[in-house]
Image: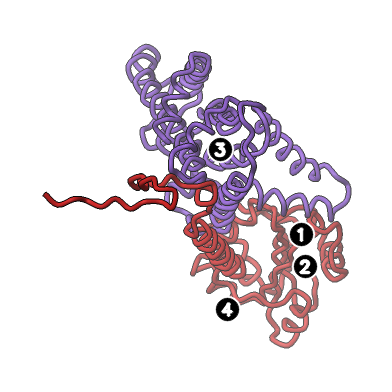
Amino acid sequence: MARIEMPETPEGFPLAAESPRPAGAGSQSKIPSLLFLVLVAAALFRIVTAAIDRGTRDEGGGLVRWTAGESAAATARASGKPILYDFTAEWCGPCKMLDANGWSDPEVAALVNASYVPARVVDRMREEGKNPAWIDELQRRYGVGAFPTLVIAGPDGKAIAVAQGFAGKPNLVEFLRGPLRKADSPAPPNGNPP
Amino acid sequence: MIRRFVRQKFGSAGLVVALAVLGLVQLLSLAAQGAAGGFAMAGWAIFVIAAGSVSKDISSGALQMILSRPIRRTQYLFGRYFGVLLSYAQFLLLTSVLSFLFVHLVVLRTARGAAADFSTAGLAVGAGQAFLTGALQAAILLLFSTFLPGIADLLGLLLVYLVLNLPQFSQAPWLRTAGERARENMLPSVEWARVLRGDGALGAATGRFVFALTVYLVLAAIVFSRRELPYGQD
């Protein structure tokens, strides 16, 4: 019968059979690299969703091709079209409804793009405590006290129609078509809500 | 680890009684307000389930026993977290099913139309909303539980809410803006009802939520893996 040789330590004791190695403090405390990969993936997801959101918000006015608010008057004078000002604010819920159900509607957008010089004027009072001077001036001129407020003004800047709030697409279309039907007869300010 | 947590939690009579009371109140609330507005009590259940999930094991010395086995600390930690989520899901499922039965077998038969807005889909969305909101709160509690004793993690969470909500009452616009940004990123609020119906799942709010949740869990893992553990003391 073959004799099994047991390895011996220098002191002459046989080495113990190797037991399942318990994880030492070092390996127990090790943080799996997978965790950091998940963190990186979450950061990427965060960035991508923010970019998507920003893209959507930039389109904010849906399908309407907005002109910069400051230069709208000059563009209107050059084109002879009336200006459509959309006085809005980031925090304003009805403004988002107007974006989603009004400016994102192809029929509304086609009407606005064809007949008006559309300009969005975003109020920053709540976020920054003040507005740029041109926004203050426009709000004062058209007596804007709530959001959304839509103002249709002639190329000369004179108000043709003003409406507050958003009461659905049919009313909005009616509001937008009104001044076009009687371009020469200015409607009184504070007309029906769009 | 998950099973151990669930056994440990539901083995405690006080906790079971607390959850039963919360469940009963939620059941009545669901019956009264309908599926959409009846999950407010669930927020309290996550506090009851998740509070002190790690710190109690540390102070009792149970953690040292657990870590004598060849498992990583992160395995233990995430076991606790998923144990919290599983317990919470069980709570939500049980109260939802009981509420559904209660409303359809009792309320609607005795007072027809009393809970007309009580639909299965609405109930599922409400429960999902409560679960996801609870998942973030549980992650924050887990982080605090890794270094605060007892149920001080609850106080930590309360403090976070307080500190992040105070700036909105300030007169200084920059402070209000800073507070809003901090709140958006640290306690992101997502319109889960909308997202769960498939609208805006890839919105910025969802991104902020996923990132914040991951950061809390990774931070908890880092803190817990680095800390020295005391033996049988708090």
Residue A46 position by quadrant:
bottom right
Kind of residue sitting beneath label 1? Pro
Q: Which residue is mark 2?
A: A159
Tell whether label 1 touches label 2 (CB within 8 Å): yes
Q: Which disc number belongs to residue A189?
A: 1
Q: Which residue is mark 3?
A: B138
Kind of residue sitting beneath label 2? Ala
Query: Along the line of sight, which residue is nearer the eye, A157 or B77?
Result: B77
Say whether disc 2 or disc 1 marks the residue closer to the N-terminus. Answer: 2
Q: Secondary structure at mark 3?
A: helix
B135 over A153 or under it: above or below: above
Q: Is residue B227 left or right of residue B128?
A: right
Quote the CA–CA distance across marks 2 and 1: 7 Å
Say whether disc 2 or disc 4 marks the residue closer to the N-terminus. Answer: 4
Residue B89 rendering spot, x and y as whole percentages: 43, 33
Residue A161 rendering spot, x and y as whole percentages: 72, 63
Residue B233 position by quadrant:
top right
Tell whether label 1 touches label 3 (CB within 8 Å): no
Q: Secondary structure at mark 4?
A: helix
Q: Which disc number belongs to residue A114?
A: 4
Query: Along the line of sight, which residue is nearer the eye, B204 or B16?
Result: B16
Colour of chain B in the rendered structure image = purple
Residue B101 rendering spot, x and y as whole percentages: 34, 20
Q: Are marks 3 and 2 on the same chain?
A: no
Task: Give the quadrant of the C terminus of chain A.
Answer: bottom right
Residue B123 rendering spot, x and y as whole percentages: 41, 33
Q: Are marks 1 and 4 on the same chain?
A: yes
Res A101 seen here: no
Colour of chain A in the rendered structure image = red
Q: Which disc number belongs to residue B41?
A: none
Q: Residues within 10 Å of mark 1 (few under 14, many from 20)?
A: some
